[in-house]
Amino acid sequence: MRLSQIMKSVAVLASVFVLSACAATYQNHGFVPSDDEMLDIIVGVDTKKSVESAVGKPTSSGVLEDGAWYYVGSKFKHYAYKKPQEIDRQVLAISFGKSGRVSNIERFSLEDGRVVTLSRRVTDSNIKGVSFIRQLLGSFGRFNAGDFLGGG
């Protein structure tokens, strides 16, 4: 009887281990200041330096000197062998005016986002039917040595 109880205990522990291995795990990426932290930022008063000291440096910034700062945070769900799924995204955009002071504060979520199709430009080869190696080998002997030796 004692052996059967040990076997039952092992079976229960193995079941718990197997079921816990199938549980989803969550990972957070990035940083977005909370609404409470943003209460200290005053539109028209605060500057980049005061924003940085209040909530930290941004994840990214706009390309213009007086552009916006973007704080981006995402939460991903990982489940077994499946591709990770983004279940939450927050973007906090702080815009700065010409004076260098905060001009606008906006918060966006995953629901506010939209899919943007990127344009991909690929240059086709203008030489048809000639391999790269053939082009490379074909260029040997087609130069003027005087151009490389300082002659005219």
Image (spheres, grey):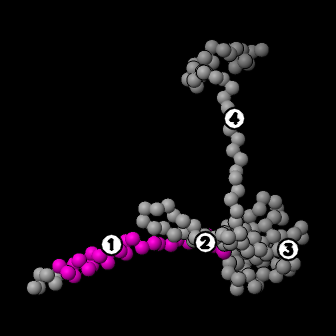
Numbered disc in front, either 4 or 1: 1
Please, is residue 20 above or below residue 67 in the view? Answer: below
Amino acid bearing label 3: Ser
> What's the distance in space between the residues labelled 3 and 1, CA to CA?
53 Å
Horizontal relation, residue 119 to residue 141: left or right: right
Q: Which callout, 1 or 2, points at the residue further toward the start of the chain?
A: 1
Per the image, the residue denoted by label 3 is 103
Across and down, in percent, residue 123 comes to 69, 35
* Residue shown at the point (58%, 25%) measured from the top left: 132
Amino acid bearing label 2: Asp
Do tag 4 and tag 2 residues touch (Cβ < 8 Å)? no
Amino acid bearing label 1: Val
Quarter of the image for the N terminus: give it.
Answer: bottom left
Q: Is residue 143 magenta?
A: no
Q: Which residues are magenta?
A: 7-32
Quarter of the image for the C terminus: give it.
Answer: top right
Asked where in the image residue 52 lies, by quadrant, the reply is bottom right
Q: Which callout, 4 or 2, points at the residue further toward the start of the chain?
A: 2
Circle 4 SS class:
loop
